[in-house]
Image (spheres, helix red, strand yellow):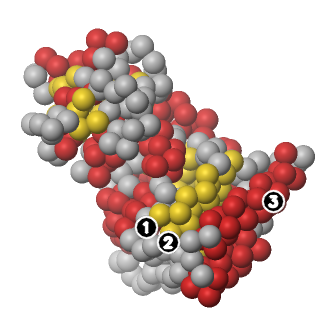
């Protein structure tokens, strides 16, 4: 699951949409209970639908649901599972973070827990550079999922790759090969740009020194959070994730320290905002460049009659109350092309646990 898939789910408007979410387990014996949990939740969802619609009317949805459940491979579940089904589609998402156990029938798919999990997870991109097959991965901590759309994986098919280099008198084959590699990695960066525009996350690179150097040269401006040096062509997504995550984890720490310095400078230039209400207002105007949030900060809130964020909430379960206004601000900043950096609890005490570096 990435932000693009999340937006696809959020765009669906048709009744009924059935969403089932639950925590799952990676290893035995805990994962032995997962099929039973799924079956119980499917039964609950089925009974709710049959209690509201004639069986013939919801038969296509139930058929999709049952086929989806039959195809679940419990040997490869992670920490959370989502089943999203309506008359026209059936999607399964295996996630590397736990979800609450829910059955929701509505005109839209239930995505609140998913928004929260995506916003708070340590997510990043990985590009494994190679002329044989440059691969792109969506990563959450040490879990990598290979992307097989948008031109990926990409193979260098030109001269110096699958095609022989030109020969003859006066031809500098080394320089010619290098230029062709630069062009190949320009194409890689161009294809990756579409993914980055949809989900602007930090980038980690893996590959031999030569390819790392070429990519850095042709992709000026990319924020590289970590690099893993060496030939990674033979590594599976699982093995690559285990190898690269320790470096990425350190990269997140370094990034946090740097952005705190950026915040201090922005405060001096009067290009920063503090408090949740102010950050929410300015993020909605598209002025948020970088949002800093303490890891454990959650806050219910409502929008009052003057369009301002009101944190004085007596009943967090009331229908007009946002479960977590912090997640709302995070989503606003990301949707408008900004970045989000999570900070250790207590490090933003002077800003009431949240701060926004402004574009202007």
Q: Describe the element under mark 3 as helix, strand or loop.
A: helix
Expressed as whole percent of the image width and height from the top left, the position of residue 266 reads: 17, 24
* Mark 3 Cα shell of 10 Å, populated few (<14), some (14-19), many (≥20): some
Look at discs 1 and 3 and give the one toward the viewer.
Answer: 1
Above-or-below relation of 5 to 170: above
Q: Residue at x 53, y 30 (%)?
A: 250
Tag on residue 16? 2
Q: Nearer the viewer, residue 47 or 210?
A: 47
Tag on residue 107? 1
Mark 1 and mark 2: Cα distance apart in space: 5 Å
Q: Residue furthest right?
A: 29
Q: Residue at x 46, y 27 (%)?
A: 295
Q: Nearer the viewer, residue 222 or 84?
A: 84
State which tag comes first along the sequence, 1 or 3. Answer: 3
Q: Is residue 41 left or right of residue 174?
A: right
Expressed as whole percent of the image width and height from the top left, the position of residue 41 reads: 71, 59
Q: Nearer the viewer, residue 242 or 329?
A: 329
Above-or-below relation of 351 to 107: above
Q: Describe the element under mark 1 as helix, strand or loop.
A: loop
* Tags 1 and 2 touching, CB below 8 Å: yes
State how many labels appear: 3
Q: Is residue 73 left or right of residue 311?
A: right
Quadrant of the drawing holding the C terminus: top left
Q: Residue at x 65, y 78 (%)?
A: 62
Q: Nearer the viewer, residue 24 or 253?
A: 24
State which tag comes first along the sequence, 3 or 2. Answer: 2
């Amino acid at each position: 699951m990435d932000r693009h898939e999340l937006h696809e789910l959020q765009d669906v408007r048709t009744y009924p949409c059935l969403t089932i979410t639950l925590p799952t387990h990676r290893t035995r014996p805990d994962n032995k209970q997962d099929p039973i949990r799924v079956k119980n939740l499917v039964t609950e969802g089925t009974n709710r639908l049959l209690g509201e619609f004639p069986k013939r009317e919801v038969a296509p949805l139930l058929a999709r649901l049952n086929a989806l459940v039959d195809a679940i491979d419990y040997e490869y579940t992670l920490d959370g599972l989502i089943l999203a089904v309506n008359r026209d589609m059936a999607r399964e998402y295996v996630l590397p973070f736990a979800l609450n156990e829910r059955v929701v029938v509505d005109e839209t798919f239930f995505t609140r827990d998913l928004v929260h999990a995506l916003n708070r997870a340590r997510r990043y991109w990985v590009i494994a550079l190679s002329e044989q097959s440059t691969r792109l991965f969506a990563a959450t901590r040490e879990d990598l999922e290979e992307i097989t759309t948008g031109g990926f994986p990409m193979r260098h098919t030109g001269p110096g790759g699958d095609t022989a280099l030109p020969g003859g008198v006066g031809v500098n084959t080394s320089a010619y090969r290098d230029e062709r590699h630069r062009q190949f990695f320009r194409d890689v960066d161009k294809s990756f740009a579409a993914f980055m525009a949809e989900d602007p996350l930090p980038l980690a690179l893996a590959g031999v020194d030569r390819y790392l150097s070429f990519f850095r040269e042709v992709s000026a401006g990319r924020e590289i959070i970590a690099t893993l040096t060496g030939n990674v062509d033979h590594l599976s997504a699982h093995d690559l994730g285990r190898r690269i995550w320790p470096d990425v984890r350190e990269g997140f720490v370094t990034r946090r320290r740097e952005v705190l310095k950026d915040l201090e400078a922005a405060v001096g230039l009067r290009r920063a905002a503090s408090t949740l209400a102010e950050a929410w207002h300015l993020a909605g105007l598209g002025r948020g460049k970088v949002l800093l949030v303490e890891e454990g900060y959650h806050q219910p809130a409502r929008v009052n009659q003057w369009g301002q964020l009101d944190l004085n909430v007596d009943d967090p379960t009331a229908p007009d109350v946002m479960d977590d206004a912090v997640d709302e601000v995070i989503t606003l900043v990301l949707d408008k092309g900004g970045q989000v950096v999570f900070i250790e609890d207590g490090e933003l005490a002077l800003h009431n646990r949240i701060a926004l570096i402004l574009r202007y």
